[in-house]
Image (spheres, rainbow, N blue to C red):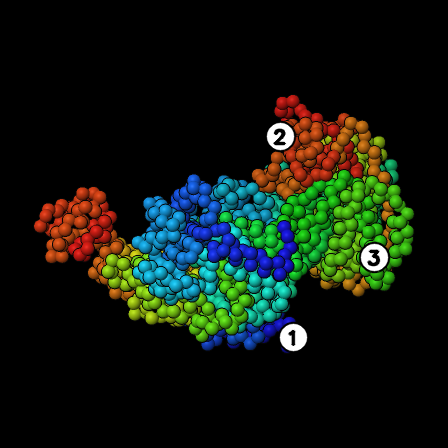
Amino acid sequence: MQILRKEELEKIKERASLDLSIKKGEKRVKINLHMGTCGIAAGAKKLDIIISKEIENRGLRDIKIVRSGCAGLCCREPMVTVEYRGLPPVKYCDLNEEKIKVIFDRHILNGEIVKPYALGIDLEGETPLPTDLKEIPKIDEIPFFKHQILWALRNKGIIDAEKIEEAIARGAYSALAKVLTSMNPEEVIEEVKISGLRGRGGAGFPTGKKWEEGRRYNSFPKYVICNGDEGDPGAFMDRSILESDPHSVLEGMIICGYAIDSHQGYIYVRAEYPLAIHRLNIAIEQARNYGLLGKNILSSGFDFDIEIYPGAGAFVCGESTALMYSLEGKRGMPRIKPPRSTESGLWGQPTVLNNVETFANIPLIILNGGKWFSSIGTNGSKGTKVFALAGRVNNVGLVEVPMGTTLRMIVYDIGGGIPDKREFKAIQIGGPSGACLPASLLDTEVDFDSLDEAGAMMGSGGLVVMDDSTCMVDTARFFTDFSVDESCGKCVPCRVGMKVMLNILNRIVMGVGEIEDIERLERLGQHIKDTSHCGLGKTAPNPVLSTIRYFRNEYEAHIQEKQCPALVCVSLIQFRVNPEKCKMCGLCKKACPMEAITWEKKSPAVINLDKCIRCRSCIQACKFGAIE
Amino acid sequence: MNHRTVKLTIDDISVEIEKGKTILEAAQKAGIRIPTLCHDRRLTPFGACRLCLVQEKGKSELLPSCFTPVKEGMEIITSSPEIFTSRRLQLQLILLNHPMICPRCEKEGECDLQRYVYEYGIEENLYPWERISFPTDDRSPLIQRDSNKCILCGRCVRICDEIQGVGELSYSKRGIKTLIDTDFHRPLSCEFCGQCLDTCPVGAITSECFDYTVKAWELEETTTPCPYCGCGCSLTLGSKGGEIKRVFSDPERGPSDGNLCARGRFGWDFVDHPERGKRPLKRLNGDLKETSWEEALQSIVQEIERVKTQHGPENIACLSSSRLTNEEFSLLAKLFHEVIGTKQINHGEGLTYQALTEGLGKSLGISASTNSIKEIRNADCILIVGIDPGKTHPIVKNEIHLAIRRNRAQLIVLGCHDIDLTRNTQISPLSPPAILIIEKPKTELTILNFMIKTILEEGLEDKRFIEERTEGIFELRQRLNSSRGEFEAISEEKRKVIQRAARAFSQSKKAMILIGLSKGSYLEAREVAVASSNLALITGHIGKESSGIIVLLEKCNSQGATDMGIFQEEGQISLLEKIEEGKIKLLYIIGEDPLLFNPRWEKALGKVPFIIVQDLFLTETSKMAHLFLPVCSFIEKKGTYTNLERRVQKLNSIRPPLYDSRSDFDIFIQLLNLLEFPLSGNTPEAIFKEITEHYPPYQGIGDGDQWPKGSTYLFSNGFPGGRAKLIPIEAETPRAQPEGFPFFLVQANSLFQSGLLSLKSESLRKVMQKPSLEMNIEDAKKFNLEEGDWVMVSTQNGQSIKLKLKYSLKPALGVVIAPSPCPLLDEGGMAFVKVEKLKGQPFAQS
């Protein structure tokens, strides 16, 4: 372990920047393998093996491989970015074993860009684009990337998360050096306050204010906790940051420690994120080796260390006080407030807890100033927000947009709209705590206050797009079921009330609901919101309340007409072919796993209900909506 | 307006209350009732039931009153249509899974849920629900649990953790399947204090003793002090027709804050034990035959007068338990001191009195503990000398646990074995770890002296306190400096630990010393008390709240015995020797069963021409009596007990004496009448009045007061003699360990067995652990002994017992712990023994 000085850090930065570039030196080609969990799941490891073998077999020494994190467009993984000296970097997507071999032979060995596989070219401006490449879109012009501003995700898919030097080359720990050499804790807090940064975990508490409170209490030791217990279904922002750029989070935490006079930090991260934990462990060890963590950081005399604590899989442990109990080895159940955690948190000591994304933003604020940060965003919400865009949208992936971007832009411009020519129906924002907003609210700006007004919430940033094949009652039922399972069991309204709501929803989707059930749901939902203790309980009825608010007709259809308009709730589907709509194509027969459909050319299909298991395969197969 | 208080209105009633208190507490102060289910005043607020919601005037937000702190100028309303609807809905939700079997629930009539359901008029269920059922747990002794009735308020979990420091129960599973359970759903294996069933607001945790013959509203409630240890908790007996059905403790009375231990809550069934003495018995032609009270008492009077004139008063002795009331002790003292003319009354606790009278009495001027039990929770350093309060004084253990938990108090354990409380310091990495000074017995004094020496040498003493309020510092310093030999035996490593303890003790703000002395304790009572007093005095930790010395007395009225002047001049073994030498011609045994504890007594008692046994039970010893007088139990008599914190509490009877038994009081009155001794009256009230008139500390004392009147702690205005005395004391040179007897044997009390009464409690016998010999694992390995081996423990003089061996981390090397009472112990409460492995299993233990 060494103790670095600020100047030495700068030298490392210079050296590493040279290493990262292939403009000079012996490395001629850089292959950037995007190996986030999404890439690996899509097969990136196979590509890695192929490339590594080829390089080894051919004894090539001039090729540099970077194993970075997610590049953002998860639905097009595996992705590889290839940079050949003298040519702009090219992103290839939807790769497989054959394609990578072609790319290897042509682009990597011979500098010949494989146009059909290319997603886009990353032009840094200075290189004039060869005319024959004009047909390949520029990355900056692809709508998915064009509207994004990458702050928290600044190193996403660029650096090898397991090499601290690459992070340093991209500016990691410069903010820390600035803080330790030229700022006092009050100035750090002031800068964060000026930035207007609000907690990215969902509730949006002003970060600077939280730090200020954490500093105010004179009881030691104090703790800094990073909440990486990302549990919302469909959310993966924090995972991606931890996987692709763990140092940004570590740096943010150390700065926080300096600001509030704490010397110990904990990262509470889901055990279901093994890759994130693995990379964090490496990052912590490397930071310790450089003296960027531990005793006497950057020779400043300031000590700070970080430990990782893998969670045990309870959704409620994402709630800050429950998380602290869990860290203490107790059952994760939210604690009453006051006192706030900044006064009495972990082990009863002042504790500042922030979300992964919040910490990742801190170094930028320090380096560029709070004013710079607050230059984008809306009145009450500054900076950018990372969203995990998923569901029925063309571009599924991780996006970072300025606060105030409209939902429409996220869905249609960045997300590329709805696939299969379907209709947009709703967007679910904020996970089980959030709400489903209809098309009429697509122009809502994403910021803490506007979403709140619309009856939704920012949550941690999960965005699930739904098209007209989604039943809103069933969607509400799904999220309610999740909340029922994940309620910690402490307070009555959430524990029992949510179960009652689920029971009511179950009978509605079974076709035995009563019209009064809608009012019952509303009354219970409001009661649970008003009287539950923690954020989980207070927001758990949101999916139901928002769907009743915006899609009441669907509830009524289920109850009064015993129909599920989206043909999702199997109890309400007759499984009958409407001969008028049937185009006699026979696709339903092919899809049926039970051979329950009889069809002959030029005649409508018939479903034999005795054999039908109501699996909905035929409904999904039919392009004409002929099955009722 | 005081800056520490805030003013607010609740339902337009204005209340002034300390800052930091909750709306609920303010409402309670104003006499306004807010419904709660998960609230227990002993516990930190939890906020689970959401019934206590209130509103601020003009605002719609519902505030949980149980944890929302009061703010200046708040205007709170506790009822509004919103609040009413919300509470109703909450109750409806709770009832969905709550079985409506109230008529066959033992909680009926005092169930909080039942009351609110009634008050809020909850009717039919409006919501779809399928009952989720849970397995009931009736496998555990004494305590039964039914999770179906449980409303998950968490009070049992929290009281077990926060107050008891045990954590036997916890939440298990999630969501709607959440239940309260032990780990892995095993039967309870805990302190069986029953605090969980005490706090349960519904009938989910119930007592096995409550036998489905009575309803809560039929119970008559009587408060009376607990007859077990010196804590003297106030018991509220729920009885019907003179039979106790259950026991709890009124938080407003006694030292325990509403808490009780297993003995207090379940140990009362000895009062109906079949072995209770029914009629007076007299030995005729070798057999005990029924006789009349008149004849029995007459024969005592005749014998006393005969022995006194023929042999002299020194031939008459009394062996008395410390469970007599103050009034009874006062009469007993008159009988022996004034009528017979001997001070030969030996009371149950061996030499404890020396700690009080010669130790604290001579040093400080008052022979009693200086502070109260409830003050322990606010101390930030607690030094425990030679006792495991968790076993002997569970309520004190709770207080220590609270100090550790809430104040992060420094625990210092000085003794020959570690105690369970040490574990409680490990609940947080920020709690200072306990400082353990675990050494062989009889080194305590040296260690205390070394602590004092360290403090004086390092200048950590409270110089002003010493100068203004003590005398003898010069002599103390001189004595400590001149006795190098005493400290030589302490290893360098140990020295560091003791020095650390000395610094922690002297530098803390509020420090308490708890000394444990009881029958069979090996501590040198007088010396340890003096050394403790020296330590408290030089650090100024006395005469203040939560700073001082508490002597953990064994029995419910040990303090009273001392107060009433029952001082013994020698220990029980000396009396035994006298008897063996034939020097005692009349022995009056009251509430003691010496035969049970030491077989030597059998032969000795054979040499006494006239033995009177006055007891609740027909004991082993009573079989050798010439006269047996059956006395009544604590629920059948009147009088007062004084607990170890000087609190005088009145006994209230729930029934007349059973059978033909009489109270010790009546027997003494009648004897004194027959002996024509003038008395100021013949009721306990009259005698108590006499005590309050003649014994100054008791002046003006009423039921529940601490003497001297109003003093929770002593010496706030200085010491009775002007200055407290620092008395240098020398540790005795330890006895040489005899060759071939490598172990010190000491005895340890069990939580469930503290002596004669607990032996006769069927409830406590159910939860009693099997007796075993605890040995340090390292020692056991050295001697090739394995856990579960049957071993023979024998002393030099050939006495032996057989026990099962238990590995332990607690005892110091070279120390073995036997369960109390252990017959091998000598006068000093210890013995040198050897431990040998037995082949096979013995048929029975001797």
Label 3 SS: loop
Discs 1, 2: same chain: yes
Report the quarter where the N terminus of chain B lies.
Answer: bottom right
Q: Residue at x 38, y 50 (%)?
A: A110
Q: Is residue B523 above or below residue B563?
A: above
- Give the residue pinned by disc 3: B459
- Give the residue pinned by disc 2: B788
* Residue A476 vs residue B771, the one in the foreground: A476
Q: Chain of mark 1?
A: B
Q: Name the residue type under label 3.
A: Gly
Q: Name the residue type under label 1.
A: Asn
Which of pointers 2 and 3 indicates the residue nearer the eye? 3
Work out how far the residue at label 2 is from the one at label 3, CA to CA, in angstroms.
Answer: 50 Å
- Give the residue pinned by disc 1: B2
Q: Residue at x 41, y 42 (%)?
A: A54
Work out how far the residue at label 1 is from the one at label 3, CA to CA, in angstroms.
Answer: 39 Å
* Residue that lies at the very extreme toward the left in this rendered image: A602
Report the quarter where the C terminus of chain B lies.
Answer: top right
Q: Which mark is residue A40?
A: none
Q: Residue at x 62, y 54 (%)?
A: A291
Q: Chain of mark 3?
A: B
* Residue A464 vs residue B645, the one in the foreground: A464
How many residues crowd mark 3 within 10 Å: few (<14), some (14–19), many (20+)? Answer: few
Work out how far the residue at label 1 is from the one at label 2, CA to CA, in angstroms.
Answer: 64 Å
Discs 1, 3: same chain: yes
Discs 2, 3: same chain: yes
